Amino acid sequence: AILTDGAGGHRLHRLGLAGDADQFEAIQRPGGGALKPVPDPAGKDLEHFYLQMDGAAVFKHAVVGFAEEIEKTLARENLKPEDIAWIVPHQANERILKAVSRRVGIPYDKFVVTIGKYGNTSAASVSMALGWAAEEGIFNDGDRIIFCSVGAGLTFAGALRFFASGSLDGQPRAEAVLRRYVEAALLTAFAQSPAFDGGLVDRGPGGRHQGA
């Protein structure tokens, strides 16, 4: 567990991390780095300084990556799909999330989806969805919730938490809510970072990273 030093309350359990470096071109901005720090003065290479995305590749690998993180979290925690009360995913788009729902066998109505309210808010989306759901009161004490996220790189993350309302280890409610936001933001930040190596994960076969 992270961000915790006591028993009880809600907990973000062991964090699963993975990445597929073979798909780095699926979402990228070639310009702006050390090899091409600034655009050509004549504007000949401006396209390299805009975000580029291969929609078909992102859809395919995002569905697989999301599903794998959910399934690995279930296996890691010795749980079945029916044991999960809610999925709080990165708010990519509804087509991706519906495909993930079918792939893992968890009904779509158990997915917290805020795309219609806020759109895809990138690295903020998991914590925003968690905050909205908590404020709306849709979670119950003891609910098992899986967070999952995907980002450029391609990178993936997933983790389980138990929900508990009110105080957290004696903390006032406001501090407990803040802690939820921080935990969810950390998970999303790991998955949204295309360079989350360096001790966090071990390189697996075929350029794919695996970690926990």
Image: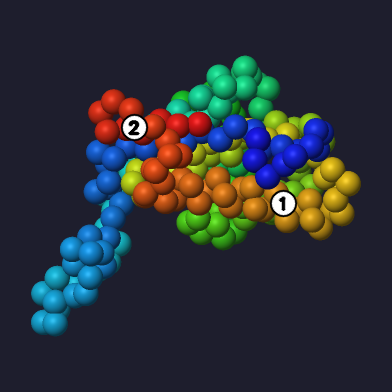
Tell me the element at label 1: helix
Q: Nearer the viewer, mark 2 or mark 1?
A: 2
Residue that mark 2 sits on: 203
Q: Which mark is residue 116?
A: none
Q: Which mark is residue 179?
A: 1
Q: Residue at x 56, y 35 (%)?
A: 15
The amino acid at mark 1 is Arg
Tell me the element at label 2: strand
44 left or right, relative to 60: left
Q: Position of residue 210 (x, y in %)?
A: 40, 30
Q: Residue at x 18, y 63 (%)?
A: 35
Q: Position of residue 142 (x, y in %)?
A: 79, 32
Relative to 167, does residue 82 appear above or below in the rendering? above
The amino acid at mark 2 is Arg
155 or 209: nearer the viewer: 209
Q: Quadrant of the N terminus?
A: top right
Earlier sequence position, callout 2 versus callout 1 = 1
31 left or right, relative to 74: left
CA gap between label 2 and label 1 equals 31 Å
Mark 1 burial class by Cα count in 10 Å: few <14, some 14-19, many 20+: some
145 left or right, relative to 139: left
Q: Residue at x 27, y 60 (%)?
A: 29
